[in-house]
Amino acid sequence: MNLHWIDWSINAVMILIMVIAVVKTRKYTRSVADYLAANRCAGRYLISVADTMAVIGTITIIALFEAYYKAGFTFGWWGMLGGVMFFVALSGWVQYRFRQTRALTMAQFLEMRYGKSFRVFFGIQAFISGVLGFGIFPAVGGRFFKYYCGFPTWEVPVFGVPVDLTLGIIMAILLGVSLFFTFAGGQIGVIVTDFIQSVFSNVAFLAVMIFLMIAIPWTTLYDTVIQRPPGESMIDPFDASKISVFNVWFFVIHIVLQFWYYMSHQGNQGYNSSALNPHEARMAKSLGVWRMSMQGVPIIIIAMMAYVIMHNDRFGTVQQAVAGSFQAVDPHTTEVIRNQVMTSVVMSQYLPIGLVGALCSVMLASFIASHDTCLHSWGSIFIQDIVLPFRKTRLSQVQHLRWLKFSAVGVAVFVLLFSLFFTQFDYIFMYLDLIGISGAGAGSVIIFGLYWRRGTTAAAFTSMIIGVVAFVASFILQKYWLSAYGAPFPLNSRYLMLICMLLTIAAYVAVSLLARKPAFNMDKMLHRGDYAIADETVVLNKTPLKEWMARIGITQEFTQKDKAIFFFFTLWQLFWFFVFGAVLVIRIFVDIPDPIWSAYWKYSTWMNIVLAVATMVWFTIGGVMDMKKMFRKLESKRLDTTDDGEL
């Protein structure tokens, strides 16, 4: 075992606090709207902190560990292009209009736009692709705890197939805890526990990162990474051409996909409907992008320091301990799994008592947050968008809640079995992209559905069908190519996703234009104009805005604090775009030596650490205040049995 009793105690205390919190929130879950979307009572800070914790999850952290261990800071450099998403979030893209519909699931909005048959069609695709993607979450997270804690492999044959019972037991326990939080309070319980876990993990993450920055001098890091061969630099992004997967094109395509598939993935769909009003939803997304950028700082430092430990002779003792740990857990660990858990195993052997438990608590919190959110989302989508549309009579609130909870149990059982028997064959990011292709038409039907009056039901069906065909073809092609030629297909999952996206856009536009049907009534769906709902749009400034403010997306719903946040985020990102562009121009004329790159990464890292601490304090205070407001609103809300996600 790699954990001391002090390390176990840290994790036990965190779980105990969350159990107490979720038990206390059970009384607030009285209706379907409470269970599905916290009855639309959550504020921006509470959503941004909790949702970010759910989105980043254990699988994302491990995927980033895997990427940074391979590519180092160069992964982060090209990732600066992702700053575009700050502006996307600030604009309210998709999120604002979706919240205006008051839909409790994405497919409910699509029924408003395209009809009930399309709701079911979309719901089936979203559910299948979602649970298949979710299917590897327990295994990836479970392997972290297996290798990090040092639990030995215990394999037994099941129907002739070897099954890792150690991993199975770990997954079953963690899924059980996640399911309890989903059961107990629905979206209210999920938000509260995810928020608590986020605050807890922020402190632990920062403690681990600062320890590593002090314990391993920057000069040691620099001396280690410059030993890499040409074309594989971990600090100079212009000397990383041999790191073929995580290069500039990886990020360019990633940004395009992120923009077009914004909110297409429904694994956290409860958060999309939980905000007080559309403006709060917009601000929550903006704050969430900021917090996500701060969360990335500890991840890259931990992965980079793990690389240093494994490639510097100074840490020979730790290297031997890591090798011994792999041998003790499973002497037949595959290369794919070894790459996934390498950073984790190194940290379990290097960090001191207390910090080993702290990092474990971060991963435990991330596991539970992502899993309770996904169990809630996919279980709800199955009932709301696949089962209920076929019913001719409404369920009572008690029946409806019971069905939603049983559905979450079914999802948990499926992903447990899937994780036990499925063999992963690609990077985590690539696998998730491939699974996402089954819903490749989702971006088109959502965006055109919210922003284009001419879109038709036939166009929506065509777009989604092309997505299914592309998914099946891509999956078969990749598996066949690997089997026939012993090498991955020349185009990875991310390129295939881009091709599919372009095909679905072209199909949607062409079919809609050929139909020549009357324009759809967007005002009614978005509750604007004559259909406006008083509580949904809060005009705080009656005086007309200056034209330049309106042009950049500021509305009369913005308070002075909102404007300050808007301008701060905008100027901050523009500054980094300027740095990015300036370096590109300089690099055209002269090479930038490694010492300059090292200094850049050192000082930018410490600057981000200071900002991360400030953000943690700021968002924690805001989240606690939002939580109190949410409970007060839930207590005063009138029970509306018709607000159950059915039209």
Image: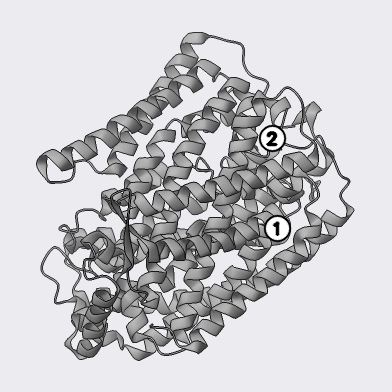
Closer-to-camera residue (366/613): 366
> From where the camera sits, is residue 301 visible?
no
Which residue type does callout 1 highlight?
A: Ala
Q: Residue at x 21, y 66 (%)?
A: 332
Q: Residue 184 has which mark? A: 1
Q: Residues within 10 Å of mark 2 (few under 14, many from 20)?
A: many
Q: Residues within 10 Å of mark 1 (few under 14, many from 20)?
A: many
Which residue type does callout 2 highlight?
A: Thr
Q: Position of residue 40 (x, y in %)?
A: 74, 48
Q: Relative to 91, does residue 470 appear above or below in the rendering?
A: above
Q: Position of residue 182 (x, y in %)?
A: 64, 55
Q: Residue 101 has which mark? A: 2
Q: Residue at x 48, y 32 (%)?
A: 125
Instruction: Say how the picture is coloured.
Output: one colour
Q: Marks 2 and 1: which is nearer the front? A: 1
Q: Position of residue 286 (x, y in %)?
A: 58, 55
Quadrant in which residue 345 is drawn:
bottom left
Closer-to-camera residue (505/395): 395
Left or right: 137, with 548 as reference point? left
Q: Earlier in the sequence, mark 2 or mark 1?
A: 2
Q: What kind of element bears circle 1?
A: helix
